[in-house]
Amino acid sequence: MSNVMVKKPDFSHLVRLSTSRGLYEHALFNEAREEHGYCVDDVARGFVLLCRETKQDQHLLALENIYLDFVLEAIAADGSCHNRMNAAGKWTDIPSTSDWWGRAVWATGVGAVHGSTPQIRNRSLEGFRLLTRLSTADRMALAFAALGAGELLILNPKEAAAREILLLAELHLQPKVVDVNWLWPEPRLRYCNGAVVEAILIAGWALRDMALLERGLAMLKFLLVVETHEGHFSVTPPEGRGSGDPKPAFDQQPIEVAALVAAAARAWEYSGNPRWLVEVERGWNWFLGSNDGGVQMFSPETGGGYDGLTQTGPNLNQGAESTISMLSTAQWAGKLQDLFLVS
């Protein structure tokens, strides 16, 4: 990596958005919008972030436990999962196996391996096993679930439910037809596309399927071509992106960058190829201002990540998803920069 130094993640805004119950989803500038409540989507992301944080303190450990409590409370007896809770602590939706189920599987799988205490790891494993009484063929839910299942299967190759999820990921997340011009399982990119690639990579590694791992690396190369413009990331907007769609397109979401970075970090971990370090750095540089707007995408004063890159600049609201995306990118970049410098 170059000499661009990675700023130490500042968790102060994440703390500001959090309560003893969970993590508020939205913010108006840097103030939590309590009326919008909480969701498993963001609490699960926050839990994964904290499980991977090496410089833990008692405040972050307390948040890690709060976030885990929230995710576990969301799980129904049959393994389906709620997503939305109002500010009063009442679930407002019907549990299902949609995206948030996948994120809950991701969180509990990561927590079972990387949780900061034995109690967190044990409770996470119990949650994972309850959630995986069910399954899904939905691509995005399956991609998120595979991220947790892969972590767990690497630690414990006898964890049968984790293996089943990864086999489903192998079946549903690869392109059905090999097309060098569109190496993707759907005709359009959707959202959090890097998670699909990362799921294939971790499945290949955990299942010891080197052909699958190579397919993941090829998909990542393809995705990076599609999501890069003039040397910087130019990620897929919420409407998606198809072959030949013009660049740049807006509003670009920080979660897209964070997912690319996580996939590139995983590719480096499994291949050792330093080209992937360059992509991790490119992702952090997007937040620093190397993007289609030439603007910084977080507030150093608050520690919050901006909610999107528009044609006229950043959306200055600092919600949970965008803040976690920025912190996750800084976390990966800092970790790999340290490894690169040592090596």
Image (cartoon, helix red, strand yellow):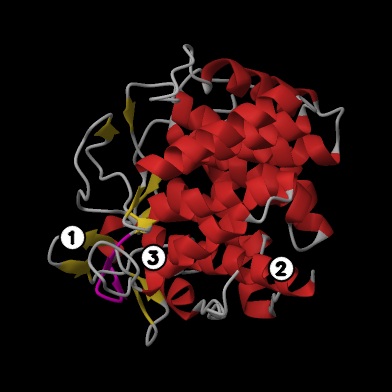
Name the one closer to the observer, 113 or 18: 113
Residue reaching furthest bottom? Answer: 301
Q: Residues within 10 Å of mark 3 (few under 14, many from 20)?
A: many
Query: How many numbered tags mark residues here?
Result: 3
Name the one closer to the observer, 184 or 207: 184
Where is 148 relative to 307, above or below? above
Q: Nearer the viewer, mark 2 or mark 1?
A: 2
Secondary element under disc 1, as helix, strand or loop, is strand
- Residue under label 1: 310
- Residue under label 3: 286
The stretch of residues the image draws in magenta is 26-32
Mark 3 is on which residue type?
Trp
Secondary element under disc 2, as helix, strand or loop, is helix
Mark 1 is on which residue type?
Thr
* Quarter residue 127 falls in: top right
Relative to 263, 133 lies left or right:
right
Where is 174 relative to 119, above or below? above
Relative to 269, 157 lies left or right:
right
Task: Return the disc, 2 or 1, that comes first in the chain's sequence.
Answer: 1
Considering the image in quadrants, where does the N terminus appear?
bottom right
Task: Return the disc, 2 or 3, that comes first in the chain's sequence.
Answer: 3
- Residue under label 2: 340
